[in-house]
Image (cartoon, rainbow, N blue to C red):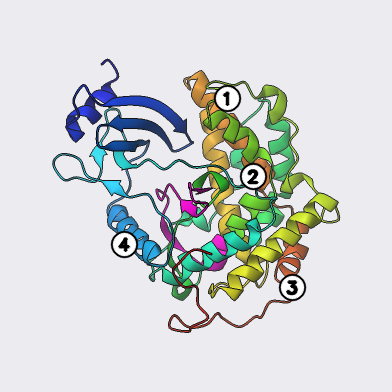
Amino acid sequence: MTDPLLTAAYAAYGWGPEVTVAPGPRGALGRIWRVRTPAGHYALKHSFETPPDGRLQAELDLTRRAAAAGVRVPATHPAADGRLQVPAPGGGVLRLYDWVDLRPIDPAAAGTPERLGELLARLHSCAPAAGEQEPWYHQAPDAAHFAAFTDQPWSARLDRLRADLPQLTGALTPPDPAALRVCHRDLHPENVQAGPDGDLVVLDWDQLGPADPVRELIQTLYAWFTTDAHDAATDVVNGASNSVSNSDSIGAGVGAGDAPVGDPAYRRAEDQMAACYAAYVDAGGPGRVTGPGDYTMLLADRLNFLLHQARIAADPRTSADDRAWAELEIDETLRLLPTPEQLRVSPARIGRTRPAAPGPPPDDPRRAQPGRR
């Protein structure tokens, strides 16, 4: 075996020659291998960055709470010495999980908004209080940071974004410390899929940390219902292509950021978001949509991530595969960002007919209960 990472994995988990490892999907922050052993199949994940101190314990606590609330979470398994994460050669960490045969969920399918809203309600209802939130989730880079990228396939789209940036970042507000709970913070469609029995399975808890539930709700609504870039990324993840050139597609995507509020496709997306929010409230979710400030986490996270991926894509030292992936992420992020006009009108449309009062207390019988919906 010549791959140093897999050599380290075999040593750490005590695998012999009867164990086989095959490449699986990758994302911007990690890569998966499928592991076949006599005892069963597992997913070996290489997270490209080492998590900060305390995140592993916070993840274990939240996933235990989520499982008790009826949320499906793949089990994690220790290395031979008992560690749940193993340092990886070249950086990052290795984790071993149960392999679950999954299928993507169609955001446009009947019932998807309601199922997603109930899932979010379960996650937020069981989440413990959290401490201070990282600036990444409520502070954004200014326009000057995006002016450095010229002669790229996506430069013109960044120029259009720079024109809107003052209005977008003007909506950002610091979170209320009393509202912060431990949240997943990355609930895009690739991280919520259907298991063999149809139940929703939540994956990739690597970005877990403090968030206001309503801000994670808005972030999730836009990830699910306002962009079709997810389809292109999923094709690559599922092996349709291991190395793609996105130069032809990066320049002209259609998503939330390209659609006026009167566009029929965007109005349908708002209807889906409203249905998801209604199901969330009915299932006892604590967040309430009140205005543009609820978009803070969506905007700050996406803008910081966009700048990070732009730097990767523009770096001449970046490999072809990593550049192709970064360009996919740039495209998807630009599709996901709302426009200033959407910030003005969409919160009221998403929250229409829903009560402004907080959800029921944790012991109220109306709160989401464990079990399949």
Q: Check residue 213 for magenta coloring.
A: yes
Q: Distance between the Cα atoms at labels 3 and 2?
A: 33 Å
- State which mark lies toward you, 1 or 4: 1
Marked residue nearer the N-terminal end (2 or 1):
2
Q: Check residue 168 for magenta coloring.
A: no
- CB within 8 Å, label 3 to label 2: no
Is 197 on the left or on the right of 169, as rendered? left
Marked residue nearer the N-terminal end (4 or 2):
4
Quick one: SS at disc 4? helix
Q: Which residues are magenta?
A: 192-217
Q: Which residue is mark 2?
A: 143
- State which mark lies toward you, 1 or 3: 1
Q: Which residue is mark 4?
A: 61
Q: Which residue is mark 1?
A: 240
Q: Quadrant of residue 295?
A: bottom right
Marked residue nearer the N-terminal end (1 or 4):
4
Q: Residue 352: which numbered mark, if any? A: 3
Q: Quadrant of residue 144?
A: top right
Front-lying residue, 298 or 125 = 125
Kind of residue indicated by mark 4: Asp
Q: Distance between the Cα atoms at labels 3 and 4?
A: 34 Å
Q: Estimate the x, y position of residue 340 in percent, counting from the top left.
A: 74, 56
Kind of residue indicated by mark 2: Ala
Marked residue nearer the N-terminal end (3 or 2):
2
Residue for point 55% across, 49% down:
188
Front-lying residue, 198 or 303 = 198
